[in-house]
Structures are given as structure tokens and as C-alpha cells.
Image (tube, coloured by chain):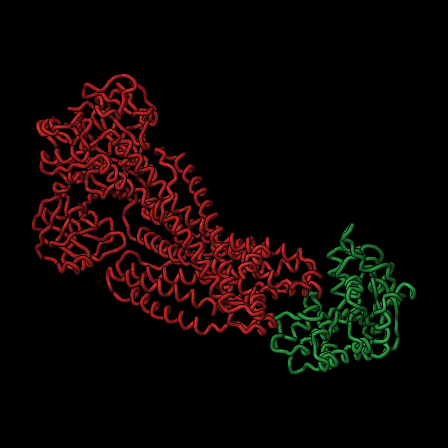
Chain colours: A red, B green
Amino acid sequence: MIKASLRGLLQRKLRLSLAVFAIVLSVAFLSGSLVLSDTLNARFTALFSTINQNVSVVVQAKDPQAVEPARLTDAQLRALSEVDGVKAFSPDVSAQGVIPFRGTDGEPVSADAALGFGVDGKDDPLGLVELREGRWPTAEGEVAITAHTAELAKVKRGDQLKVYLPVLNEPRSFTVVGVAGYSGGRDSLAGEVVVMFQQAFAQQTFYGATGLYGGASFAAEDGVSDDVLKQRIVEQLPDGFKALTGQESSEEQSAQVGVLFDVFKYILIGFAVVAGVVGVFLIFNTFNIIVAQRTRELALLRALGAGWGQVAGSVLLEALIVSLVGATVGLAAGIGVAAAGEAAITSEVALPSAGLVVAPLTVILAYLLGVVVTLVAAFVPAVRASSVPPVAAMRDVVRPDKSLTALSIVGAVFALPGIGLVLLGAFADLGGTAFLVLLGGAVLVFIGALLLSPLLARPIVRGLGALIGRGSAGNLGVRNAARNPRRTAVTAAAIIIGVTVIGMTATVVQSFKTSLEDIMGENIGVEVMIQASVTAAPDGRQGFNPKALEQVRAIPGVKEAAAWHFDALGVSVAGQPQAFGIFATDVGQAARMFPIDATDGTIRTLAAQELVLDDNIAETLKLKAGDRTPVAIGGVTRDYTVVGVYQATPIIQGILVGEAAVADFPGPLAFQGFVSLNDGVDAAPVVERIETIMKDYPGVQVGDRQSYVDQATASYDFLLIAVQILLLVALVIALLGILNTLVLSIVERTRELGLVRAVGLSRSGLVWMVTVESVLITVFGVLLGLALGVGLGAAFTKALMTLEFATVIAIPWLELGQYLLAAVVAGVLAAVIPARMAARLNVLDAISYE
Amino acid sequence: MTTAAPPLIRQRVETSAARASQVWKVYGTGEAQVVALRGVDVELERGRFTAIMGPSGSGKSTLMHCLAGLDSVSRGQVFVGDTEVTGLNDAGLTRLRREKIGFIFQQFNLLPTLTAQENILLPLAIAGRKPDQEWFRTVIDTVGLGDRLGHRPNQLSGGQQQRVACARALVSRPEVVFADEPTGNLDSRSGAEVLGFLRRSVTEYGQTIVMVTHDAVAASYADRVIFLADGQIVAELTGPTPERVLDTLKSLDRPAQLGTEL
């Protein structure tokens, strides 16, 4: 029996290679995404271990993001350095958000404050930083810079360098007296920009006084372990500080930077999930068809006396061998793909090499997908095949379809409650829980729809066929696509999954954009927007100085200019933490620029300790006009009076306080500015002049109304692109799945093909027949996916509308049309190889094919 | 100006519906070479029912396949009507099948996705021709399928399926219908129905039919029986009866005589 199944393996090379192909492809996408993600992670970890190479213990403030983080004094530092076992130490004076301007055009070298560092320049006892030329700064007006910074800022030793300084919140000019690098000849560790100041100047500027340090790094004497030294240092540690070993510090830092990298990682994991789910369908379908086609052969074995178990066993053995080969090749291919991806990424971003990371989980998932799914996929039809009476199976070429009733009932059991939940989430006013309800409902609807898709396949395919399946060849293609609704549905599943996700995202994004545009276009008196790009939640320490607006107000044609401040960290109102923060601005002015309609009290310029809030928050906090409530900002709690409640809109919502409150904010900088113009004044020249004024603030962007909409929707566009890439992956896999199904169908229908050729169908007719079938499968998938996606997207948008985040449900017809077109192209492409195969068949051989 | 004339009007000086001239068919090369046909000359008259018989491996199926353009010949010429089949490319063969040839195979004659009626009309649909309603009704009535036209093949018995196949072969009024063991898979009663129907289509409507069979009773429905052995025509009967066919077959089974008879 084993011999028979092994021989069977080799005799069906075509089917076999398709099955292996399906497994390889799915496993490769899955493992490739995981390996790439892990490898990049490892590179980040490696980055920080090189930084902490010679560091045994790091001492740093427990909460570096605090408004007033803890600082080490000279005496405290000395005490720590005298701890037994310390060989060398390096105190830390540093700040983020130090951005140099290019010597050539005066533009900031980076808009990303997280990548700009200011430190004190001096010899590094721990041997990471090395002076390459010139000397360390010894006067206030001098700086040294890293070689990478020199390159970006296009300056050399002796040149002047303008540098934006946080805390001072303005740029200063310095003379470059030295250029430094890192051990091992590196110009930068990870593409960061570093400016090194005289120590006293750095302390004064960053910490407000000399003799203060943000922390320190310590190297242990030989024979003293990092942990032992850490214990000894902990005993001497001042309040507000923590000690970490070098390794712990690396892990913590890479975890922090990892947050930036997380978006990318989630995209990769999204890839892996899509590849995995779609792969399950691909493998399942392929094996299902292969085993189903062998029903007669299996029946013959049964007729010759093979037991039920022997037949199923032989199928499983075959599947096991195929899947082991497929999963192994797929894993190898995935590692190769990851290596290529890594090379592409690290050619853009300098990161130390850490080798390819193939985690055990990756290997387990790869084999789980490749082997287990394949075995299950093979087992189901094998059981079905072996339960057919041998004689019936041998005689009947065409087996009647298994009823779809049971499957459809299960599908309805999922879909109907799902639809209920979706409607509940969309229309009932459930506040934040609406999205959980919606998400749960969406998942149920989706599963239900996949289970119901075979039932839908026949009518939809026939309906579509009436449109495109003209002529007898086309008509035959339509019937082939409709003849096995399970196969059509499973083949289209990959597309349904991908298109549902994209359709949903596109609908939400489009609705959001249209809502914003509607509001911005209709009733906003703002022509120019100033927007700071910030790396952390804006708390007044990043952004632009509101004083700069004085210059803006002086520009001819400018009617009003308003600064908006924001803080979220540690903000609470009525004892409730406010994750969406608090805004400080001239509310009276805001009401002239934006539609702010009072539903209670009045909306006017606020004095100190007065606030207004939107109706949703007022309801949550149970506040009304005239109430007094405690408000905590920047660690200070004061009693505020509620002056008014206004109707939330997609652009203005939240808690607003007067400009006086900015004194309590962690920093004085504004993160948004709005400018209104006199009637008939052209915005473009004003934008240009404001840009010149804002040039000193790195990361501050100026634009007209449309650019504000674009900017506000930019992150959604990014999301849309990420999802579109996912769709592409799903589409590629789906394309190969369709190819697989068609090739197997052609093998299965060889005699039919011979027959239609014998009664006069031309080669091109045959090609058209196969193409129609392929296109119908893809279009069926896209239509179902779009219906699901747009429906769910509309439901999510409806819930967003309840929360005033959107005003309309907008369907992105153009995009939807493009997806449909892409599907048609994919369908045609998928048909190329199978159609050629079909056309090449010799008529006589095909008819006598067994 | 050219007009496409219906096939039956295009009767020229050509009196044979199909013709093979010095046809050789050789499979493989060298040691593995098998000669299936050795210089066969045969002419199949218009409006007659010809059966081709012979033992297994005699080349009877190969001859039919070559005549029908399903297989290429190694040497010689094949004509269907006034068209030379040998040398036609795929497009030419496709046109030939559309316009001049009907097929009935031993089994698997019908597309499972189409109803009986759709199967019958398939060649016309493929060729983009409108069915002649009167002729269609005549054919349907003759094969006696009137009430089964909406059924799919898997709802029909084997005999009914073959009758649908016959109707399909006849509905386009081809120059010649090639039938490859059309009753091979049927019980004798169903087989007799199908053969009776083929016979009537020759007698009443002047259809030309060429049938390969190994069944003497089936062959007796024909006007003429050609016997093949070892790739050559070795005998011929006109007005066959089952007994005469069997006698001839028996004589062919004695290999010693083969050489002397020729």
C-alpha cells in the first residue's frame, strides 16, 4: 500500500508540483514576513548593545518624560563613581530635539525631533565616541558634531552651524570646532544627528543650571559582574533614579525605538496573517481537488480489497511527504525573501548586522501551515472518497454536488447575529464600545460570508456571465465557473479576504476625508494652517513659539492668527484622565474661525481657570455650564469653571481652556496655528511668508486649507497604502490559487476539452473559455469582498459619525473601480498558463484521456 | 461576392464523402516502430453507411481517426468532401470539424454542464450558426428525445446519452459522421435503438456515416463493411448480415491466410 502511494506520487508530477507550489508559496510569504520582522528587531537590539558595549550599569531618571525629570548633582555623581568596583564612568548631559540647519539652504536637516540629539562634548571614558579631527568645544559658542551630522548639514570644521535648541525653543549659531565618530569607524549609530556642546552650556541650556546630569554610565572593574555592580550602585542611588545593567538598558532602549518600528512590524505581521489565512485556502483547495480527482483510483484500490484505513492512510502519507517538502522549501524561500527585504531596508537605514533571525515560532508556524493544513485538506476528501461505494465511484465520472445546505446554515448562523451586531454598533449610541461590538459583528459577518460564498457563487457567476460570457465559448466558461460552486468559492476566498479588508479601509478613509473636506470647505474662516510634526504627544515642548505669530499678524492681508497649545500626559478633568488631552487657545477667536455652537452656556474668550468642552465629554463627565471641577495640567491641579458646552464636530472637539493655562503646560510651544485672511486675499503668498517665519522651528509645516486636509488624512492614506500592499499580496496568492484550480480543472476536464475541440471549437475559443472562467472567479471574489468591505466600512463610519468624527459615508467609487479592474487583469493573467495548456492538448489524446 | 453555401448544396463532381489515398501511419522510430496503416486506399461513398471492422490492433480506429483529421498521417492523402485534410493546420481542422464532420464517440460524448438540447446544438453554437428549426425537430423526433431535452447528461441513461450524441452529430448536417464504437458501452437493446437511428438517418435523409465497430451485429446495420488486419484492407462486404460478417472475421483470425489473400 505504501509502495502504491509512493509510486502514485511520482506518476502525477503535474498535480504534485502544483500542490508543492501552493504550500511553498503560502509558507514562504508567512515565514518571510516573520523572519524579516524578527531580523530587523534583532538589528535594533544589536544597535543598542553596541552603544552599551562597554557599559556595565546605566543610571537614569525613572521618568525621563516628566515635566521636571530627576537630575544628578555633582556630589551624587561623585558618590556613585566612587562605588567599589567602578572602573570608569561617563556622565550624561543630553536632550532630544536638537536639530541643526543645513549650511547651504538653511533648512533643518531633519524634521524628526527624535533623531536629533544634543550632548556635552568630551572624551568618552567608555570608548564609544571618538574625536576624529579638531577638538572638543570649550566655549559656549562652540560645538563638535558627528561625521554623519557634518555630512547632512554640509558643514566642516571652522564653519558656522545654526542649531535649534529645545527648552530655549529657538535656534542659535555655533562654530564647529571638531568632528567625532564612533568606535569601529562608524559615522553614526543609526542615522541620528548629534551636536556636542560645551558641558556647562549644555547643562545650563537643557537642565537650567550647571552641575546637573541626566544620568551616567559605569564600567565595572575586571572580576566585578554587571549585576553585582548594579546592586552596589542601587544602594547609593538617589530618589527618582533607576539603575539598569548594560544589557537591560539595551533591551529597554530597543523596545522604545521598537515602538517606531512597530508600524512596520505590524504591516509585516499583517502580511504573515494574510499569507497564512490565504495559504490555508490555497492548500486546502489544491489538495481537495487533487484527492477528489483520484476518487476513481482510490475506488479501484478499495475494489481490490484495500481497507478504508489503508486508502485514507495512503492519501495522508502522500500528503505528508508533499507537505514536508513544500514546507521546507517554502521556509527556505521565505528566509531568502527576508534576506532580500533586509538588504533593501538596510541599504536605506544604517543598522548593525545581526544575521538573519529564524525564530522557533517561525519554523513551527511554517510547518503548521504547510503540513497540518495540508493533512487536513487531504484528509477530508480522502474520507469522502473512501466512503463512496467502489463501484459507484468507478463508474461515475461526474459526481453529483454535495448539498450546500448544511454549510449555508452554518454560514447563516454566523452571519445573521453578525449583521445584528454590526447594525447595533452602527446605529445604537454605544459610545466607545460601539467599535468592539462592530468588530465582533464584522468578524462574524465575514466568517458567515465565507461559508455562504459557495451558495452565492452560482447565481453571481451566472449573472456576471450573462454580461461577459457571450458566444458559445464564453458560455461554456461561465458554466464551468458555476458548475462547482465550492471550488469557485474557495478559490475566490483569498480575493474575498483581501478585498474585504481594503474595501472597508477605503470606505472609512474616504468618508473621513470627505467629511473633513465638507467641513473645511463650508464653514471655516481659516485659510492658512501651521502644524508642528511631533514625535511624542505634543505637550508644549515641541512646536513653535507663539510669539512668532506676532510676525504673522503683521503680514498684510492677515486678519487673525491663533495659536493652539495641547497637552495630554497626566491631564485629568473631574478626576478622570483625559487621554485626548486639553487644548489652550483664545476660544473667542476660535469661535470666529471654526463653527463652534454652544449647546449650554456661552463660548467666549476664557479667563484663567475657565473651560469649555464638547457635548460628548460633558455627558461622560456629567458637567454643565456653571459647574466647578478640578483640572490637573502639568502636575498642577486647579478648580476650573465650566463656561460653556459646545456641539462636537469632526474638527473641533475636546476640552478647551484659555491661553493663561499654558503656564501650567510642560512647555510654552504651540503645536498648531490657524490664520484667517481678509476677503479677497490670496493665500499662496501668505503661506510663503509664514513659511519663512517658521523656518527656525524644525518640523513645523505651513499650508493652505487643502494641505491641512491632506495632512490630517495623511496617516489614513498611509494606512490605505499599507492595506493596498496587503491586497496585492492576497491578490498574488489568489492569482496562483486560481491558476492552480484552473490547471487542475483542465486536467480533470481533459476529455471535455477534447470533445469541444472535436465538435469545432477553435484554439482561441478554448483560450477564451478558460479566461472567462478565471475572470469570473476573480470578479466574483472582488464583488463579494467589495460588498462586504463597503458594508462594514459604512457601518464603522456610521459609528464614527455618532462620535462626531465624520459627517458623511462616502463610497470611494474610483478606488473600487480600480480594484475591480485589477481583479479582471489578475483573472486574465491567471488564465494564461492554464489556457495555453488547454489549447495545446491534442484532440485525439484528450478524448481518449483516462 | 461570395456567399457561404449550406454544406449540402455544395455537391461537386466529388462523389465520395471521404477518401484515403495510400495512407501510411507509423508510430515511433527504429526498434520501437509500429506500423498502424500500410498504404490504405479507401473511398467512402456519399449517402452510405460504412462500417470498419477488424481485430484489435488492426488499425481500424487509426484509419477512422486519420479520415476524420483527428490524427495525422505519415504518408498519403485524406480528403473529406472536396477538402484535403492532410496538411491542414489547426485552424483549418477546426473549420473542417465545424463544417463537414460530426463525431460520435464510444463514451463521454456530452458536456456535463449542458442540457441535452444544449449539447445537441453545441456544434452550431460554436460555429455561430443558427439551427434549422425544422431539421432540429426532425432529428429530435427521430431519436425520440422530445421529453428529455432539458435534462443533463447525468440524468440520462447510457442509451439516451448516445442518442443525444447522435442527434448532435446529425444536427449540423455534416458531410460525414464518424462514429467510434458508438454502441460499445450499451446493452443490446439500447445499442439496437442507436444503430436503428443511424440506419434511418442514412436511408431517409441521405446522411453519410462511417462507423468503427467490433460487433458483427452492429456492422450488419451498414451498407458496406471494410475489414482491416495488420494495417491493410483485407476484405469487404456489401449488404452484410451478422453471419457473413462473423464468417469473414473468422477467416481473418487465421493469420496464415493473411499473406495469401492479398
Question: Split into 4 quadrants, where in the image is the N terminus of chain A?
Answer: bottom right
Q: Is residue A337 left or right of residue A215?
A: right
Whole-percent x, y for residue A591 in the image: 21, 50
**Residue shown at 81% from the left, 77% from the top:** B205
Quick one: A606 or A460, which is closer to the camera? A460
Q: Nearer the viewer, residue A287 or A549?
A: A287
Q: Is residue A836 left or right of residue A84?
A: right
The residue under the point 37% across, 71% down is A413
Indicate the position of residue A30 as horizontal and vertical percent values: 41, 50
User: What residue lies at 19% left-to-right and 28% top-to-bottom?
Assistant: A223
Is residue A774 in view?
no
Decide if residue A540 is in sight here: yes
In percent of width and height, residue A217 lies at 19, 30
Give the left or right position of residue A118, taking residue A329 as reference.
left
From the viewer's perspective, is residue B200 above or below residue A309? below
Q: Does residue A31 sit above or below A90 in this rendering?
A: below
Which one is nearer the viewer's eye here, A11 or A205? A11
Number of numbered discs visible in the structure rendering: 0
Residue B106: x and y in percent read 71, 71
Q: Quadrant of the C terminus of chain A?
A: bottom right
